[in-house]
Amino acid sequence: MITTYTINDASQHNDLMKLIIDPTQIEEDGSFTACELSNINDPSQLQGFIFIIDKNTAEQLDKIIVKMQGFKPFLDVKEGEIYDDKAYLSSVKERIAHLEKELEAERAKLNE
């Protein structure tokens, strides 16, 4: 599943955009033939499913499909495609760096 945001996240992320997909433009397999991508605060020309996405996701729209969970739409990766989730990778790298510092501190305690 692709990470989407809420309008409240705009203050924490400066690269968020609004993706609007007209439900009539969604194919059976979830791919969509047309969409509107704009700044969060810009007025929209289309009506339809609105997703708040980051710039990384916007650059990979060709790899994304719309799926439904009950009556709620969500974005997912097309089968066979590789989605480069930079936000996730960044958080993993930060976690690894934090754990490496903890390990170094523990090793220093053992050597005292």
Image (cartoon, helix red, strand yellow):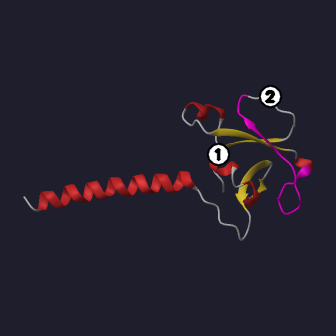
Which residues are the magenta region? 25-41
Dot 2 crowding, Cα within 10 Å, few <14, some 14–19, many 20+: few
Residue lying farthest to the front in this orientation: 59
Q: Residue at x 73, y 51 (%)?
A: 74
Q: Residue at x 35, y 55 (%)?
A: 97
Whether 56 is drawn above or below 83: the answer is above
Seen in the image, is 41 located left or right of residue 86?
A: right
* Mark positioned earlier in the residue sequence (1 or 2): 2
Compare residues 105 and 73 and report the one nearer the observer. Answer: 105
Residue 61 horizontal/vertical position (percent): 74, 54
Task: Answer whether labels 1 and 2 touch (C-beta < 8 Å).
Answer: no
Q: Residue at x 12, y 62 (%)?
A: 110
On residue 43, which mark appears?
2
Residue 31 horizontal/vertical position (percent): 83, 58
User: Which residue is identified by label 1?
Assistant: 55
Q: CA distance from mark 1 to mark 2?
A: 19 Å
Compare residues 77 and 63 and report the one nearer the observer. Answer: 63
Residue 58 horizontal/vertical position (percent): 70, 48
Compare residues 73 and 30 and report the one nearer the observer. Answer: 30
Q: Is residue 28 magenta?
A: yes
Q: Determine which quarter of the picture holds residue 60.
A: bottom right
Give the amino acid type for the residue marked by disc 1 in the picture.
Answer: Lys
Q: Residue at x 19, y 58 (%)?
A: 106
Q: Determine which quarter of the picture holds residue 44.
A: top right
Seen in the image, is 65 located left or right of residue 88?
A: right
Q: Main secondary structure of the magenta part?
A: loop
Q: Quadrant of the C terminus?
A: bottom left
Whether 22 is drawn above or below 106: the answer is above
Give the amino acid type for the residue marked by disc 2 in the picture.
Answer: Pro
